[in-house]
Image (cartoon, rainbow, N blue to C red):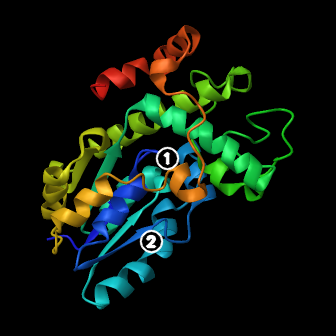
Amino acid sequence: MADIFFIVGCARSGTTALVKMLDMAQNATVFVEQKPNLCIEARNLYQGILTNPKQVIQEAKSEAIQKVLSSGLKYGDKNPNYLPFIPYIDELWDCKFLFPVRDGREVVRSLMDWHDFYNRKLSHSGVFAMKEDDPNSSVVSPEQDWWDYSRLRPNPGTLYCEMWQQLSRFEKCAWYWANFNKKALELFSQLDNQRWLQVNMKSLDSVKMKQIFDFLGLDGFNIQQIGEMLNARINSLQERAGLPDKFPPWSDWTQRQRNAFDRIAGDMMARMVY
């Protein structure tokens, strides 16, 4: 059975909550974005300008993985930046993948709130707040805000690339959710079905968490602890900063917002059966 697993899901899709529940296992150590984060490398690979991606991911992860395995534990890590590296990870290690998905409308709402949070916290940062997104931005290089740089944008020659700077942040977040999941499904579909599992975070309950534990070969499932964690808002703005949700839930969106979301992400919502 594979002793290595990776959690690869779009930002704000419940990946951190999933990691914290998996880290309750007695026979595994599960990390939240273990360094190096590969923010610049992942984006460059998505754009097709990273040389030797297999070597990059091997050098980034081999030592950390071996350290955990040599202690007799399974190794797990989550990071959205593993997305374009999926084929190389699959080639390098006998591993499994979890692909958490969340309703795109909820992801967009959360991303909008996190933009405001980061803006206040870091003053120059945010979600899609670089010069390539906004001509008035002071953030001109990946090194200035590597996490924001890591978020997918339309590649040259693709739909939305020419109009990207004219899109609202709301529309960019919808594009990001739809295209992250599109790329993930494309790459995961090339793997053996026994190597990966899609996890619908909206319907996740204790029974399905036990199935995930079994899929990964994890021991020590505690239904009471898992139930409590499922009911907690792990990694929400409330937990992280004591802040309430600010951007309205999708049920309160304007018709214009609904139309914009459906235009950009409607096909992926149907594909995900939301």
Residue at image position (80%, 39%) is 131
Task: Judge whether residue 151 can be spotted in this image.
Answer: yes
Say which amino acid is labelled 1. Ala
Residue nearest the observer in this picture, 210 or 38: 210
CA gap, disc 1 and disc 2? 23 Å
| Quadrant housing the C terminus | top left
Count residues near mark 1 (Cα–Cα under 10 Å), then give few for <14, some for 14-19, many for 20+: many
Q: How many marks?
A: 2
From the image, tell me which residue sits under label 1: 11
> What residue is pinned by disc 2?
58
Up the image or down, 30 lies above or below 156; here it is below
Looking at the image, which residue is at 17% across and 68% down? 222
Residue type at mark 2 is Gln
Q: Residue at x 32, y 59 (%)?
A: 229
Q: Residue 163 vs residue 247: left or right? A: right
Residue 123: x percent and y percent?
A: 81, 50
Quadrant of res 213: bottom left
Residue 120 horizontal side relative to residue 25, left or right: right
> Does 153 appear above or below 125?
above
Name the quadrant of the N terminus: bottom left
Label 1–label 2 contact, CB within 8 A: no
- Nearest to N terminus: mark 1 or mark 2: 1
